[in-house]
Image (cartoon, rainbow, N blue to C red):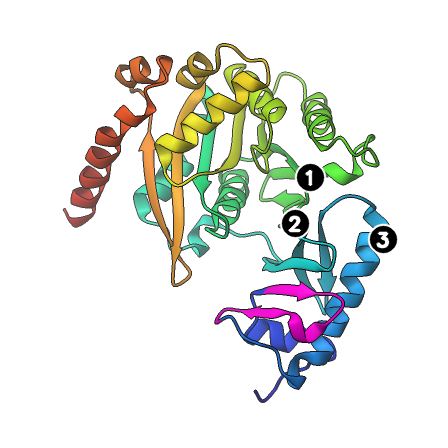
């Protein structure tokens, strides 16, 4: 364990720690990852500093259970789990690019499609917790701004990766839901919906822009996301799911609960591509469904028959793999 700087947490976190299950009353009851490590004395200063910053920020944000902190120049996403326990995850400190992520070329090509500038629509990133889907989505926004220019707006709770600013000729602004006008209210669903409305009002007139919604997390945001995508903006978001069909099924179910009776039809009209991602030794393993110019698949989407997309997903996967080897 040489070279660690436990007092600041910076060198230690860079070399070893990606996640901490933090116990703020007893640092020895914390758990470090990867490897599910029981902390010894060499971690004490780091965990005590982490506890201090987490509790200070929790006092600042009140009843909000999710937030980000910075220690020694490193950003951590924090989620309160129980009264004395927090889940802390190290997040990227700089804007990612698609070229940094070791994606397959055809997935990068899909995300940088010129056609999306004209058509707009929905691009959905799905996966389980910790699959890297948010990183890939941010990389798509940054890389498209660098390639095409334009304007992007994000709505996140909390902002995980700072991408605000210029990227080539493109510019991005970010809204942290906690900083929205109703940020002190406990009704998170309404606050999230209001932040999305604020983002739409800030779009330049007569210009199709990108809107990135950090996560489809409730019924209201699901319904609003589909309505915006149908209107022609390019909308990106993530959703928690085990595969592509279940991601679409969950999106439709949430949107219907949010008052959008035409959820399946809106998905059929607006969905351009959907990705499912997992990590294998830190490398993204991506499954995709490309719906551009595939009106023949609308019959399944309109009827909510998402399981019937499995065959097409497999066909596209094999075709892309064969194309790679050609």
Residue 228 in sight here: no
> Does 176 appear above or below 13?
above
Mark 2 neighbour density, 10 Å: few (under 14) some (14–19) many (20 or more): some
Disc 2 target residue = 162
Residue 57 locus on image (x, y percent): 80, 55
**Which numbered disc, 1 or 2, marks the residue that appears first in the sequence?**
2
Q: Residue at x 37, y 13 (%)?
A: 302
Look at the numbered disc 3 and give the secondary structure of its residue. helix
**Which numbered disc, 1 or 3, marks the residue that appears first in the sequence?**
3
Circles 1 and 3, Cβ within 8 Å, touching? The answer is no
Q: How many marks?
A: 3
Mark 3 neighbour density, 10 Å: few (under 14) some (14–19) many (20 or more): few
Res. 59 mark = 3
Q: Nearer the viewer, residue 85 or 217?
A: 85
**Which numbered disc, 3 or 2, marks the residue that appears first in the sequence?**
3
> Does 174 appear above or below 187?
below
Look at the numbered disc 2 and give the secondary structure of its residue. loop
Magenta part of the chain:
20-35
**Badge nearest the viewer, 3 or 2:** 3
Assess whether residue 26 is covered by the magenta stretch: yes
């Amino acid at each position: 364990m040489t070279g660690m700087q436990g007092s600041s947490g910076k060198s230690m976190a860079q070399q070893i720690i990606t996640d901490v299950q933090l116990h703020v009353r007893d640092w020895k009851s914390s758990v470090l990852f990867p490897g599910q490590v029981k902390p010894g004395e060499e971690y004490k200063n780091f965990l005590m500093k982490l506890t201090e910053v987490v509790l200070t920020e929790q006092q600042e944000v009140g009843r909000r259970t999710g937030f980000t902190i910075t220690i020694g120049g490193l950003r951590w996403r924090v989620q309160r789990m129980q009264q004395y326990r927090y889940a802390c995850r190290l997040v990227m400190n700089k804007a990612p690019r698609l070229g940094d992520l070791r994606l397959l070329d055809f997935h990068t090509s899909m995300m940088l499609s010129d056609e999306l500038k004209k058509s707009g629509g929905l691009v959905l990133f799905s996966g389980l917790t910790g699959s890297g889907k948010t990183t890939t989505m941010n990389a798509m926004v940054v890389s498209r701004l660098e390639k095409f220019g334009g304007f992007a707006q994000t709505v996140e709770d909390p902002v995980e990766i700072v991408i605000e600013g210029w990227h080539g000729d493109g510019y991005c602004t970010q809204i942290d839901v906690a900083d929205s006008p109703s940020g002190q209210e406990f009704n998170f669903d309404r606050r999230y919906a209001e932040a999305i409305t604020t983002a739409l009002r800030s779009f330049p007139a007569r210009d199709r822009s990108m809107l990135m919604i950090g996560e489809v997390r409730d019924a209201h945001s699901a319904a609003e996301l589909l309505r915006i995508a149908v209107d022609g903006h390019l909308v990106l978001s993530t959703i928690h799911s085990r595969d592509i069909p279940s991601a679409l099924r969950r999106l439709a179910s949430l949107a219907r609960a949010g008052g959008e009776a035409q959820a399946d039809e809106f998905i059929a009209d607006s969905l351009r591509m959907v990705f499912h991602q997992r990590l294998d030794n830190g490398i993204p393993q991506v499954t995709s469904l490309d719906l551009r110019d595939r009106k023949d698949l609308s019959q399944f989407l309109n009827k909510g028959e998402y399981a019937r997309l499995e065959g097409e997903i497999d066909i596209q996967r094999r075709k892309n793999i064969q194309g790679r080897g050609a």
